Image (spheres, rainbow, N blue to C red):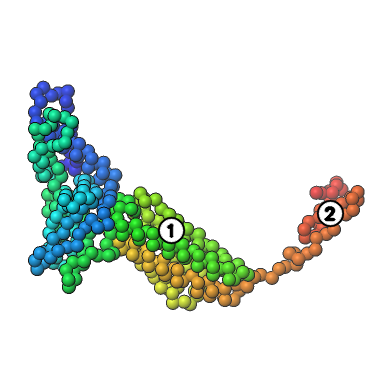
């Protein structure tokens, strides 16, 4: 069985026009759009209003009523979700809270459509006598109904007073700016990374003579750079998390290459970096948890840098190397004008020339 039925009408073979032909052509265009979105891995929320998901209102012992507005998304199988940002057109549904965590799914019907009695307004008077079809949506706390194409857009936590939004949940998104929680998480990470770089600069300059401390600070700051800069709002969130994973891998390697400073925060930071990288190795990682762990990594690094650099500067062998005789030699005085030079004058003395086998001076 084909996953996508991309069959259009061969209009050159049509002798009698029938309604079924136009229905098949409409179906073909729907399948074509779905093919482009799914094959292009465009799945998730494109835009969700900050207050687009209402606070659930309890209607029964475990039943809660919720509304959604201002949601533009693409469901798992490529069906388009477009719920207007209008209270009058908000989608309403009921959730059954059987567990401590209650997900919120929005589904697009694969087999049915909501009927409009008349298409209006229109500039084509021939369409005034026909109805229209719109995508049919549904809200639920599970995605068990196979007749719908589902996408999770929210999550709630069961409390004594009802259902409260999960502050750490972020749905699958198409852009970094698609969800307020995702964008604010990225901004917080950017600020933490910038603060960490400032901490490296301030603490490394306290040990002017310690070249080793400079080297460590420069290496750590270099790998932090990509996280401290502004990213484009249309960047894909998973590409952004991949960028952070590269930063964490670099930081982990650089810290492991150092002599053990015997600091508790040093080991805690390494553990956090390792746990985060291990989590991101799992293909089922979620944006909310990834952002949460990334922020914890940067917090740990920010707290680690000052004591780490101080401990390195206090280690034996970090003092500057003594200048050798070759560095302190007095430059030779050039010969007076007109007198032949017997050797090349260098900043470290006069280099005597040598003769070749024929008796000529070598340069």
Question: Where does the image place residue 308, in percent across and percent down from the top left?
Answer: 50, 72
* Separation of marks 2 and 1 at Cα, in angstroms: 55 Å
Viewer-nearest residue: 116 or 26: 116
Q: Which mark is residue 343?
A: 2
Q: Are marks 2 and 1 in contact (CB under 8 Å)?
A: no
Viewer-nearest residue: 74 or 118: 118
Question: Where does the image place residue 362, in percent across and percent down from the top left?
Answer: 81, 49
- Looking at the rendered structure, the number of numbered marks drawn on it comes to 2
Identified at 20% across, 53% down, the residue is 69
Q: Is 188 situated left or right of 68 in this image?
A: right
Question: Where does the image place residue 245, in percent across and percent down from the top left?
Answer: 39, 59
Q: Is 308 situated left or right of 293 in this image?
A: right
Identified at 14% across, 55% down, the residue is 92
Near mark 2 (Cα within 10 A), the count class, few <14, some 14-19 or many ≥20, is some
Q: Which mark is residue 227?
A: 1
The extreme right residue here reads 339
Identified at 23% across, 64% down, the residue is 165
């Amino acid at each position: 069985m084909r996953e996508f039925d991309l069959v259009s009408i061969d209009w050159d073979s049509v002798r009698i026009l029938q309604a079924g032909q136009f229905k098949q052509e409409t179906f073909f265009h729907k399948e074509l759009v779905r093919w482009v979105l799914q094959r292009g891995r465009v799945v998730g929320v494109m835009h969700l209003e900050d207050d687009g998901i209402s606070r659930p209102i309890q209607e029964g012992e475990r039943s809660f009523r919720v509304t959604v507005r201002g949601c533009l998304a693409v469901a798992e199988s490529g069906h388009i979700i477009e719920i207007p940002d209008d209270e009058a057109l908000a989608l309403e549904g009921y959730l059954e809270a059987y567990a401590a965590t209650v997900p919120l799914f929005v589904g697009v019907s694969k087999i049915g459509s909501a009927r409009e009695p008349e298409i209006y307004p229109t500039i084509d008077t021939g369409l005034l006598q026909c109805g229209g079809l719109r995508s049919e949506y549904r809200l639920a706390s599970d995605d068990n109904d196979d007749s719908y194409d589902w996408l999770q857009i929210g999550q709630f936590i069961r409390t004594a007073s009802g259902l409260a939004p999960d502050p750490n949940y972020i749905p699958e998104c198409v852009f970094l700016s698609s969800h307020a929680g995702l964008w604010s998480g990225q901004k917080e990470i950017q600020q933490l990374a910038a603060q960490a770089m400032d901490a490296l600069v301030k603490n490394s300059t306290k040990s002017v003579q310690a070249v080793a401390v400079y080297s460590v600070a420069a290496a750590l700051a270099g790998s932090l750079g990509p996280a401290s800069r502004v990213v484009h709002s249309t960047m894909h969130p998973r590409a952004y998390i991949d960028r952070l994973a590269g930063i964490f891998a670099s930081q982990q390697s650089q810290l492991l290459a150092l002599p053990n400073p015997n600091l508790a925060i040093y080991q805690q930071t390494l553990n956090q970096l390792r746990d985060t990288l291990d989590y991101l190795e799992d293909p089922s990682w979620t944006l909310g948890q990834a952002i949460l762990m990334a922020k914890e990594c940067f917090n740990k690094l920010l707290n680690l840098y000052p004591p780490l650099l101080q401990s390195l500067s206090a280690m034996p062998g970090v003092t500057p190397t003594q200048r050798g005789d070759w560095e302190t030699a007095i430059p030779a005085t050039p010969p007076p004008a007109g007198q032949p030079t017997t050797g090349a004058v260098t900043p470290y003395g006069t280099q005597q020339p040598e003769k070749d086998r024929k008796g000529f001076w070598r340069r």
